[in-house]
Amino acid sequence: MRKKRWKQDQILEVLKAAEAPGASIEEVCRIYGVAGSCFYRWRQKYEGVEASKARQVKELEEQNRRLKELLATRDLELDAVQRLLRKNSYRHSSGGQP
């Protein structure tokens, strides 16, 4: 079964529904089809966040993910260059013999 990907607007809607007077968290989770652990994780992450701030958080997380990818790629390229330089310096230091 494929997991559902919730958009931030939908998450905020679920959290807002749980804040309504007389609504229990278990009931809201059942209506929206959300696991209790997921709800509590969302509430911790988005507590006191409006829609505009939630978008900013999402954009910053995406930017952070992209920067981590760039850093990992750069590190791999740097490692490859260093290995190549070590290999070439070994050949030159021994007079061309392996």
Image: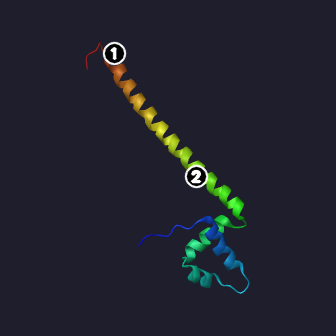
The vertical placement of 5 against 94, above or below, is below
Residue 9: where, in percent of width, then height?
A: 64, 67
Residue at x-position 61% and y-position 70%: 10
Q: Compute the Cα span from label 1 to label 2.
A: 45 Å
Task: Give left or right: position of 18 versus 30.
Answer: right
Q: How is the image coloured?
A: rainbow
Q: In this picture, is 94 found above or below 73?
A: above
Res 9 label: none
Q: Position of residue 96 (x, y in %)?
A: 28, 15
In the image, farthest residue toward the top: 95
Q: Which residue is drawn at 44% across and 37% down?
A: 76
CB contact under 8 Å: marks 1 and 2: no
| Residue 12 image point, x, y percent | 66, 70
In the displayed structure, would residue 26 be above or below residue 53? Answer: below
Q: Which residue is drawn at 74% across and 84% down?
A: 21
Dot 2 falls on a residue whose secondary structure is helix
Residue bearing the label numbered 2 = 62
Amino acid type for the residue under numbered disc 1: His
Q: Earlier in the sequence, mark 1 or mark 2?
A: 2
For disc 1, the neighbor class at 10 Å (few under 14, some 14 to 19, many from 20) is few
Q: In this view, does 92 lie to the left or right of 17?
A: left
Q: Is residue 85 left or right of residue 30?
A: left
Which kind of residue does numbered mark 2 sit on? Glu
Q: Where is the C terminus found, in terms of image quarters?
A: top left
Kindly indicate the quadrant of the structure image that contains residue 26. bottom right
The residue that disc 1 covers is: 92
